[in-house]
Image (tube, helix red, strand yellow):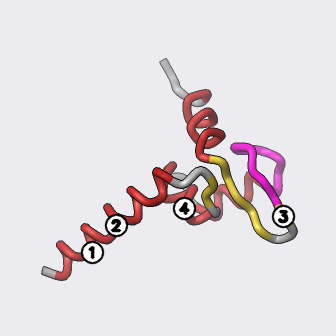
Amino acid sequence: MEEIIERLERIERALVVSQAPYLDTRQAAELTGITASTLECWRRDGDGPPYVKFGRMVKYRRVDLDAYMEAKLVR
């Protein structure tokens, strides 16, 4: 029963994240499957998807994450 509840909570979080126009690093990682630490390294190195920064707060626009993933599509 606990496993089912955990699974439903993960699905609920994914649905909320998929509707939000701006995502924090953890949410962006959940959405893309890229680890939060990889996103942080990419930011430090000037790579990865575009992001918005206000002081210490980092946000990713959903449209930028989608475009970044689309650009990496291998045919």
Would residue 8 appear left or right of 65 to someone viewing this image?
A: left
Q: Is residue 35 above or below residue 75?
A: below
- Taking the magenta stretch, the answer to whether it contains residue 48 is yes
Q: Which residues are magenta?
A: 44-53
Going from N to C along the chain, the mark reached first, 4 or 2, is 2
Query: Residue 33: percent from the left, percent from the top?
Result: 48, 52
Q: For the residue labelled by badge 3, is the local secondary structure a helix, a strand or a loop?
A: strand
Q: Which residue is mark 1?
A: 6
Q: Which residue is mark 2?
A: 10
Callouts 2 and 1 close, C-beta under 8 Å: yes
Would residue 35 appear left or right of 2 to someone viewing this image?
A: right
Q: Nearer the viewer, mark 3 or mark 2?
A: 3
Snapshot quadrant of residue 7: bottom left
Callouts 1 and 4 close, C-beta under 8 Å: no
Q: What kind of residue is marked 3? A: Phe
Q: Which mark is residue 27?
A: 4
Q: CA distance from mark 3 to mark 2?
A: 28 Å
Q: Which residue is mark 3?
A: 54
